[in-house]
Image (spheres, grey):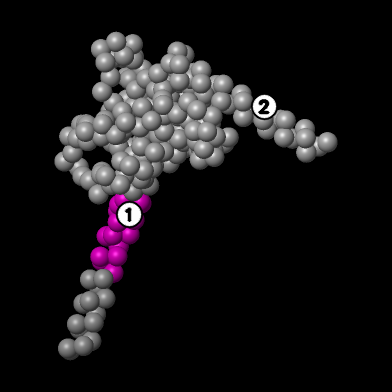
Amino acid sequence: MLLETQSISLYCETLLFQYSFYLAFTHNMVKSTIIARISDGLPLAASMDDEQAESELSEYKNQAKLIFKKINSHSQTMCSIDSEKFIFHYIIEHGVCYLCICEHSFPRKVAFNYLDELAKEFYMSYGTEIENQSLRPYAFIKFDTFMQKTKQIYEDSRTIQSLGKLNENLVDVTKIMTKNMEDLLWRGDSLDRMSSLSDKLRDQSKKYRKDARQLNIDAMYRKYGIPAAIAFIIIFILYIRFRFF
């Protein structure tokens, strides 16, 4: 009885996922994809979007740029960020952030699996060039060809057989945190200010300790310098007198 209940539950869960998967693909898979280097936020590649998408996503692409400025080597490697009409999903691998802008109806599992596939291909193609400091923005724009092909593959995966096979290989997203865009940007800005203030206070503290040591040394010179010099001269004279006379 327990086994039958578990089987029914698993079957219902599979049907629900397949239905949401189908609903997602009645719309665009992802609205846009951007790849950037996390060390400096340099955009390395991006999907070539049509004029309508560019107009619709202008504000959200600016938000994506802010995200690239906020993340660093200590950031979560997988994250979703809710931003009203759309949702951002990103992964970080080998110093590169792969970000896509999706509709809320699109399953997170599929979005992260899509990004994971892009990350593997991008690193295999350009891994040795990523840290080149002379790179220009969108130096690997040709990668859009692979992004478009990958997008088409996912859009064509509508049969139950394909869904079942895809479901076995999906990235586990159960532990991926979802953040709010406004909270992320404002809290991040506050943390940046606090970090800057902390660094400033630390530098001032070091300078204070250095100045304090110098003042103590100067005070000792003023207090003991002249007597010590006189004592040294007297000892030196006595040494010369008894040594040579």
| 218 drawn magenta | yes
Tell me if label 1 and label 2 are in contact, CB under 8 Å: no
Question: Which residue is label 1 attached to?
Answer: 217
Give the x, y percent position of residue 165.
52, 37
Instruction: Give 236 or 206, whichever is nearer the viewer.
Output: 206
* Residue with the most extreme right position: 1
Q: Nearer the viewer, mark 1 or mark 2?
A: 2
Helix, strand or loop status at disc 2: helix
Q: Earlier in the sequence, mark 1 or mark 2?
A: 2
Residue drawn at x 35%, y 51% as measured from the top left: 213
Residue 62: image quadrant is top left
Give the x, y percent position of residue 161.
52, 33
Q: Amino acid at mark 2?
A: Cys
Instruction: Give 54 or 117, whichever is nearer the viewer.
Output: 117
Image quadrant occupied by the N terminus:
top right
Specify the segment rendered in magenta: 212-231
Instruction: Quote the CA–CA distance across marks 1 and 2.
Output: 80 Å
Q: Is residue 104 above or below residue 92?
A: above
Q: Amino acid at mark 1?
A: Ile
Question: Which residue is label 2 attached to?
Answer: 12
Residue drawn at x 26%, y 30% as measured from the top left: 144
User: Along the horizontal axis of the image, is 191 left or right of 234?
Assistant: right
